[in-house]
């Protein structure tokens, strides 16, 4: 019932915004503007959308930097930039689910995470509101003092920019959930609450900040993992599947292979809850696990074959899985080459704790 109500509210909001745009936005277009400008306005809508989304995401990035997070990834539509070690690299984003824009900023420490993540979440909607106001002010300044066609057209572009940015502000500021993703407003609401949802989210952020800052998975506190998972299970929260992944890696890193396999089976059973662009990490986790823990070539290849390349899957993990597969197949020369390439990629991993475990596993291959 709650989901139906949220859908109805979003549809009503979309209809209301469309009405406002039609009544006040389109009606502001001067009737005597040459048709070339009207066509230009239509052609500019997609670039303008990228501008307002990009500005929103930059707001998150700036807020992240201000609270001491490590800014690592920036996506707008088909454009994808990722920081590898200290250098920014461009890639093409082929995931439609993430084409709406995304920024990844990684906490470097677990201190005061609640306040820091609230500020990080606020950064996007705040940037959208700033762009809305600045574009509207510029529109009124231009429309009040010019008569030339181009300047009047520029005024309309500014008005449309203001409207789109305000729409992004509303859509992101309103608390809602889409799949496993929460809107900025939804994330803020979860963090503001002093309840089990807030406790679970803070625990998850604490666990994540430890591994990304260089603590290996074997050193994660079992009490934190247990409590976070119990809360996620009780609340049926989307973070549950990711916590299964942390449990798996914790057991795998401690070489408790029976326990790790149990968590891996549960993890893969819920893989549909993970955005498609990130599922490749799960298949490679399984391929690597069976290749090293039980030296099972058939299972290693089975999960490798399920893997689909994605710019969101670390190159080092791909090379490592392929090296293990070649090693089990007896192709030691090829496996050795892949091992060297994988080791060279480890400094680029976002998850520094994982990089420690991966290095040990690669170096254990007798090739």
Image: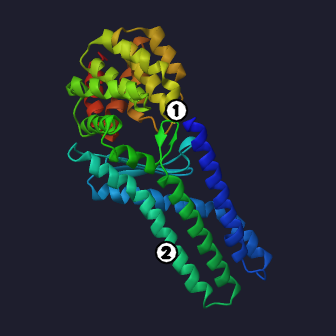
Residue 130 percent coordinates (x, y): 45, 69
Mark 2: secondary structure: helix
Quarter where residue 111 is shown: top left
Q: Where is 39 relative to 59, above or below?
A: below
Quarter of the image with the C terminus is top left
Q: Nearer the viewer, residue 217 or 290?
A: 217
Question: Spatial distance from mark 1 to mark 2, Cα to Cα?
Answer: 41 Å
Question: Disc 2 designates what residue?
Answer: 134
Colour convention: rainbow
Secondary element at tag 1: loop
Q: Which residue is mark 1?
A: 309
Question: Can you say whether 178 is above or below 329 in the image?
Answer: below
Left or right of 50? Residue 126 is left
Q: Earlier in the sequence, mark 1 or mark 2?
A: 2
Q: Position of residue 177 (x, y in %)?
A: 50, 41
- Does residue 157 appear anywhere in the picture? yes
Q: Nearer the viewer, mark 1 or mark 2?
A: 2
Give the vertical position of 180 relative to 251 (above or below). Answer: below
1 and 38: which is toward the camera: 1
Please identify the quarter of the rendering in which residue 318 is found. Answer: top left
Residue 49 pos. (x, y %): 59, 60
**Quadrant of the drawing holding the N terminus:** top right
């Amino acid at each position: 019932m709650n989901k139906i109500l949220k859908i109805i509210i979003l549809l009503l909001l979309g209809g209301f915004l469309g009405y406002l745009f039609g009544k006040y936005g389109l009606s502001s277009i001067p009737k005597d503007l040459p048709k070339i400008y009207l066509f230009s306005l239509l052609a500019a809508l997609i670039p303008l959308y990228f501008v307002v989304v990009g500005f929103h995401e930059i707001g998150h990035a700036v807020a992240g930097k201000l609270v001491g997070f490590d800014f690592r990834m920036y996506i707008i539509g088909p454009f994808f930039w990722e920081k590898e070690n200290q250098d920014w690299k461009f890639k093409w984003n082929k995931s439609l689910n993430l084409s709406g824009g995304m920024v990844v900023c990684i906490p470097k420490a677990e201190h005061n995470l609640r306040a820091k993540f609230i500020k990080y979440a606020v950064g996007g909607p705040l940037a959208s509101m700033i762009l809305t106001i600045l574009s509207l002010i510029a529109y009124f300044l231009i429309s009040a003092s010019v008569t030339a066609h181009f300047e009047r057209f520029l005024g309309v572009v500014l008005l449309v920019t203001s409207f789109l940015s305000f729409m992004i502000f509303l859509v992101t500021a309103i608390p809602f959930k889409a799949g496993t993703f929460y809107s900025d407003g939804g994330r803020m609401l979860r963090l503001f609450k002093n309840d089990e949802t807030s406790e679970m989210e803070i625990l998850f952020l604490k666990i994540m900040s430890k591994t990304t800052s260089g603590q290996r998975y074997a050193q994660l506190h079992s009490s934190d993992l247990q409590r976070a998972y119990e809360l996620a299970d009780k609340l049926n929260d989307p973070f549950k599947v990711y916590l299964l992944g942390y449990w798996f890696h914790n057991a795998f890193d401690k070489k408790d292979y029976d326990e790790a396999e149990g968590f891996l089976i549960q993890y893969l059973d819920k893989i549909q809850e993970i955005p498609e662009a990130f599922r490749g990490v799960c298949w490679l986790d399984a391929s690597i696990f069976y290749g090293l823990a039980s030296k099972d070539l058939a299972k290693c290849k089975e999960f490798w074959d399920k893997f689909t390349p994605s710019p969101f899957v670390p190159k080092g993990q791909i090379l490592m899985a392929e090296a293990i597969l070649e090693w089990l197949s007896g192709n030691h020369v090829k496996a050795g080459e892949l091992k060297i390439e994988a080791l060279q990629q480890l400094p680029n991993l976002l998850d520094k704790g994982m990089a420690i475990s991966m290095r040990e596993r690669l170096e254990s291959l007798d090739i």
